[in-house]
Amino acid sequence: MKINKKSPLPIYYQIQEMIRGKLESGEWPPGYMLPSERIFAEEFDVSRMTVRQAVTELVSEQLLTREKGKGTFVAEPKIEQMLQGLTSFTEDMKARGMKASSELQLFQMEEADVATARLLQLKGGSVYRMERLRLADNKPMALENSYLHAEMFPGLGEEAASGSIYKRLEQDYGITIGSADQSLEASLASEREAELLGIVPGAPVLLISRTTYTADGEPFEHVISSYRGDRYKFRIHMPR
Ligand code: GLP
């Protein structure tokens, strides 16, 4: 690795290009820990400030991540998700050759609050509330809080939460999932979300709120999910 100090290109820029080259070639794969600033600076015979400048820009481009007390790492690539098409988390990950799994945080039957009761058009008032950490290839991606229409799914047990809930509801309760209304907004991870998602409190998350209907138009779930902002990117095709 050579730096040309006579070049009109700034030194920090040359270091950055060298790092970009290693990322593009795969020589430094996702999760790879970069040499420390000190080692970098010694190797190139430049100041640590210059190295820091190069790295900081790549961190803000989300190509690298800094972990407090640990070091700087090559970031995992973002998952790109189309916004059209009603799919489940399990299906989304499978389509990418990744394995979906869940860590159940909470499963209980409870009285729905007014907003959820309205969204689910509840008569009885009860919902199953299920909080799941969703993982792809064992890495946390999203924290989902689901409220399911309890009367529609009698006897639903907590084991239903371990796999695909959509598959379970379709197979065991015979529903056909028809459509969903979804909104997406920016938010910041709370302490708890951050701990579960493996990010720092206040890191950006995408808050996705979905109400899902059967093919007959009956709402059966309302889900509020926090997706890691550093791992997800949503795309939509917009014909005019
Ligand atoms: C996505 C949606 C959720 C939905 C879930 C079902 O993650 N954001 O609203 O409940 O998929 O996924 P699965 O069937 O894998 O449990």
Image (cartoon, helix red, strand yellow):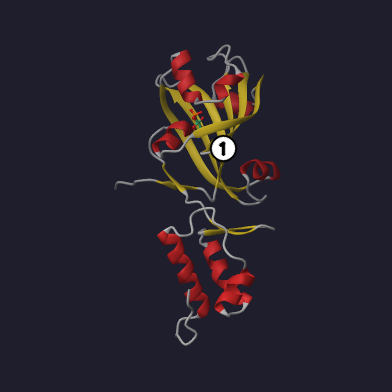
Farthest left residue in view:
240
Q: Nearer the viewer, residue 47 or 157?
A: 47
**CB at disc 1 and ligand 1 closer than 8 Å:** yes
Indicate left or right for 178 with 219 as reference.
left
- The answer to whether any part of residue 88 appears in the image is no
Give the percent coordinates (x, y) of residue 186.
Answer: 56, 48
Badge 1 density bin: few <14, some 14–19, many ≥20, Cα 10 Å:
many
Circle 1 is placed at which residue position?
225
Residue positioned 47% across, 51% down in the render: 77
Q: Inspect the image, locate mark 1, and give the three-letter code of the amino acid beneath it.
A: Ser
Residue positioned 50% across, 34% down in the render: 100
Residue positioned 51% across, 79% down in the render: 11
Residue positioned 57% across, 62% down in the render: 34
**Residue 207 occupies which quadrant of the picture?**
top right
- The answer to whether any part of residue 186 appears in the image is yes
Give the percent coordinates (x, y) of residue 13.
Answer: 49, 75
**Residue 54 occupies which quadrant of the picture?**
bottom right
Give the percent coordinates (x, y) of residue 69.
Answer: 69, 58
Label 1's element? strand
